[in-house]
Every structure is written in C-alpha cells, then in structure tokens.
Image (cartoon, helix red, strand yellow):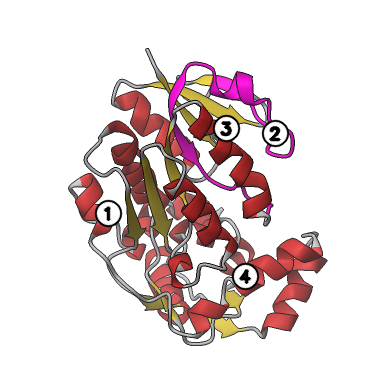
Amino acid sequence: MPKILVIGATGNVGRPLVKDLIAKGEAVKAASRSGKPVDGAEGVAFDIMKPDLDTLFAGVDRMFLMLPGGYSDSKGLLLPLVTAAAARGIKIVFQSAYGVNADDSIPYRQVELAVEKAGVPYVILRPNWFADNFHSFWKHGVTHGQISVPAANGTSSFIDVRDIAASAAAALTSSRFENRAFDLTGPAALSYGEAAETLSGVLGRKIAYQHMEPEQFVSVLTGAGLPADYAQFVTSLFHPVREGWSGGVTDHVMALTGRAPHSLRDYAQHNKAALLA
C-alpha cells in the first residue's frame, strides 16, 4: 500500500495530521529526528540538514512538506526535498505561510514556485499565525500574565493546528484540490489584545498584552537561547501583522474539510490544561 510521508511528524501540525491520516485508513511514514513510530504510523529517521532521500521516500507516493521549527533557510532546506520528490513522481502538499504570495522574492514563495513547477500534483497550504503559539512560543507570557510581542495593534486570524492538520489530510487523500493554493485562517481576525482577553475569559485570570519593539524582541529571544538569525527571522514575521496584512479571513478550511475552523476560544478551551500548566 503506497504510503504518505509526513515531515515533522512529531510537531504541532504533524502529530494531529498523522492521527487524521491513520483514522482515514492511510499507510503513513512519520519522519522525525528520532525515527520512532508515531501513533500507529511507521517511523523514519529524518535530519533536514542531511536527509537520506532513498530511505525517506521508499514506498511513498504523497508527501506533507514543511520546514521544521528552529530553521529559517526555507529555500536551502526544502528545495532539495521538492526536487527529490518530483523525480520520484510524489505528490507534494506543502505547508507554506500566509501572505507569502504577495512577493515572489520571499523565500517561502520561491519554494511555492518550485513546487508549482515540479511537474507533480501539488497543494499549497498557507496557514496564518497558529493559535497554538499561545501554549508554546508565548507560554511564558501567558503564565506570567502578559504577552509581549512586536505586533502593535495589528490583527491576525489565528488558526488552530487541528484545522491545519485536517486541511492537509484532505489535500493528501483527495485529488479534488490538486494544483491549487489555500489560505488557511481562523473564523475571525483578532488583535493580540483581543486574544489576551479571550484567553483571560477561558482561563479565569487576567492576561494582558504589551507591544514590544522589534529590536527588544530580538534581544529577548536571543537571551532565551535562540540563535540570532532565527530570532531575527521570527521577529520579521510580525512586520505583516503590524502593517495590517495578516487580518484576512477565508473559507478555505471549510472548502477543504467541510467544516468551519475552530475559534480562538475553542482553541483555548481545548488546550486549557496546557495553557494553565
């Protein structure tokens, strides 16, 4: 039975995606650093800096491709995987990022263009800011009652990773969506102040939002141990938020999955234990 390769299978999107695919009866090859099986899927060891392409792609006819967390060189790390998949006739479902199609010089957009020109079926998914960042990247702020990021008063249509995973599962298991791109958003655009109010209501304690200047944010990230280039990369992602470019809302999750996306309140209720831990 042909297998679906999931890159980043133990990550925020990868793990629920593996579960969704297994529930659909698919054979899944879960790629991670450890190479251990994931929730019923076959494990395969994967190091994005030096991938064993023959082992990785053996028996695979579809691939979910994304850039694992902690890396910023999307072109350098992902283009070899696109080329290798195309040479083997493997369908590519690529998790890109919301808004990158605004400028062909953006590295993620250049990966999209390579996927589009690869000569194999593809689907491009462009999720907006993950709601799940609140219990991962911004968890320290949630715990201490103040989220500080360089977003000013910009809004984002935060999306639950469950909806990204469900969208990817639909794209991987159907030909109906091939050779198209989808902008994945939550049902509403919220400022970080409004997001903090939503979290406060669900968690039963006050969480505030404070804008932080980009230069200070870089210093905070590097002080927490992030490499300087990755800290600069993460900080740069807030520029579109401040400019008002990340507040769009689409029906693309509905188009792919047949159901509306979860709200930020839904996300907070589902992840309440993690947010309070």
Label 4 with label 1: CB-CB less than 8 Å: no
Q: Amino acid at mark 3?
A: Ala
Q: Amino acid at mark 1?
A: Val
Between marks 4 and 1, how big is the CA–CA gap?
33 Å
Q: Amino acid at mark 4?
A: His
Residue 47 bears which disc, if any?
A: 2
Badge 4 is on which residue? 144
Residue nearer the viewer, 40 or 53: 53
* Of callouts 4 and 2, the N-terminal one: 2
* Of callouts 2 and 1, the N-terminal one: 2
Badge 3 is on which residue? 84
* Of callouts 4 and 3, the N-terminal one: 3
* Of callouts 1 and 3, the N-terminal one: 3
Q: Is residue 185 above or below residue 116?
A: below
Between marks 1 and 3, how big is the CA–CA gap?
29 Å
Q: Nearer the viewer, mark 2 or mark 3?
A: 3
* Of callouts 4 and 1, the N-terminal one: 4
* Of callouts 2 and 3, the N-terminal one: 2
Of all residues, the one furthest to the left in this rendering is: 258
Residue drawn at point x = 62 percent, y = 19 percent: 55
Q: Is residue 79 above or below residue 21?
A: below
Residue 67 relative to residue 196: left or right: right
